[in-house]
Amino acid sequence: AKAQGRDVYCFFENSMNVNAHDQLQLLQDLRHALAQGELVLHYQPKFQAPAGPVLGAEALLRWNHPTRGLISPDRFIPLAEKTGLIIPIGEWVLDEACRQMREWVDAGHDEWTIAVNLSPLQFSHDRLVRMVTETLLRHGLEPHYLTLEITESTAMRDVESSLAILSELHAMGVRISIDDFGTGYSSLLYLKRLPATELKIDRGFIRDLTHDTEDAAIVSAIVALGRSLKLGIVAEGVETSEQQEFLTKLGCDSLQGYLLGRPVPAEKFVEADKLLSRP
Ligand code: C2E
Ligand code: CA
Ligand code: CA
Ligand code: CA
């Protein structure tokens, strides 16, 4: 039994080495990904509840790896965050999203906004506000076209400094969305002072919403909280028409999810909008 135990241990150790080697390779590749133009943005529509019009898009990063194919952000953003690579990558994301938004505004979609996700490291980077300002200027894009999404836990990490950064962005006219809301530990007093535009209810509360009374109670409480603070309420991860109906009845302002639209490349995004807007 002992020998067997050791074999199991060896196997485990080997597979961990393979994993570490894999990660190292991935990191080396990631260092070149930006320069090689392998990063791409997909766009997921956000709808006014229950089913439109389209209010805008969330930019979601994808890595088009030469041998591994399309890699999802959950697999490389933690690595980019750990190594600081998220700073140049994040600058590229914002630039590309603003360039795309400029194109959409020029094509007449001036009622849309573009949402860009910020990681914790990006949010605490001292050049953030300047980088955002410069990027908007470069594309001649008015700040109200941009929504920055930061998670509740990122916003709550260092309350006073978050407040200062968000106030500065808000004063510029940039919109602020508190992502994955309900999973962090917001103090209500602090939330009241936070210059946010909307709360985005975490997908985890939406999944079982229609048959889990606790989740339904939490979502309903978040909607009430958002309303009393005059914030917009967005639900993400809406996959069924039952959820769509339920969330609309609860008073959610906007919905996002596979039911209404998956993340797609920019060309397909406008196509899908045309199909939806047809009488
Ligand atoms: P997130 O900001 O919470 O984004 C929502 C995620 O849920 C996206 O995954 C989206 O594709 C997925 N999703 C949307 N609708 C549904 C649905 O109906 N059902 C299900 N099961 N999933 C849905 P994605 O694109 O893989 O992104 C994962 C996370 O990676 C994002 O979570 C965000 O935290 C991060 N991320 C993505 N792009 C960027 C980026 O440009 N910068 C940074 N810093 N983080 C990013
Ligand atoms: Ca998001
Ligand atoms: Ca989210
Ligand atoms: Ca998330």
Image (cartoon, rainbow, N blue to C red):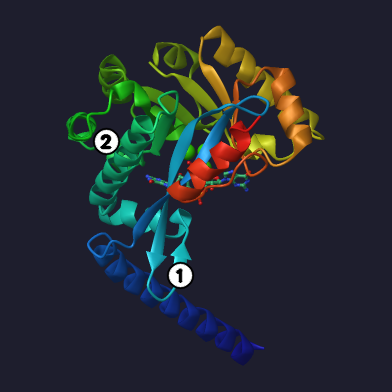
**Left or right relative to 224: residue 88:** left
Q: CA distance from mark 2 to mark 1?
A: 31 Å
What is the x, y in percent for residue 177? 44, 27
Q: Quadrant of the N terminus?
A: bottom right
Q: In the depicted view, which residue is nearer to us: 141 or 125?
A: 141
* Residue 94 is at least partly visible in this image: yes
Q: Earlier in the sequence, mark 2 or mark 1?
A: 1
Which residue ends up furthest to the front in the rendered image? 279
What is the x, y in percent for residue 95? 26, 42
**Left or right relative to 274: residue 126:** left
Residue ID for mark 1: 69
Please, what is the three-letter code of the amino acid marked with disc 2?
Ser
Dividing the picture into quarters, in which one does residue 171 lie? top left
What is the x, y in percent for residue 107? 38, 33
Please, what is the three-letter code of the amino acid marked with disc 1?
Gly
Q: Residue at x 47, y 83 (%)?
A: 14
Residue ID for mark 2: 124
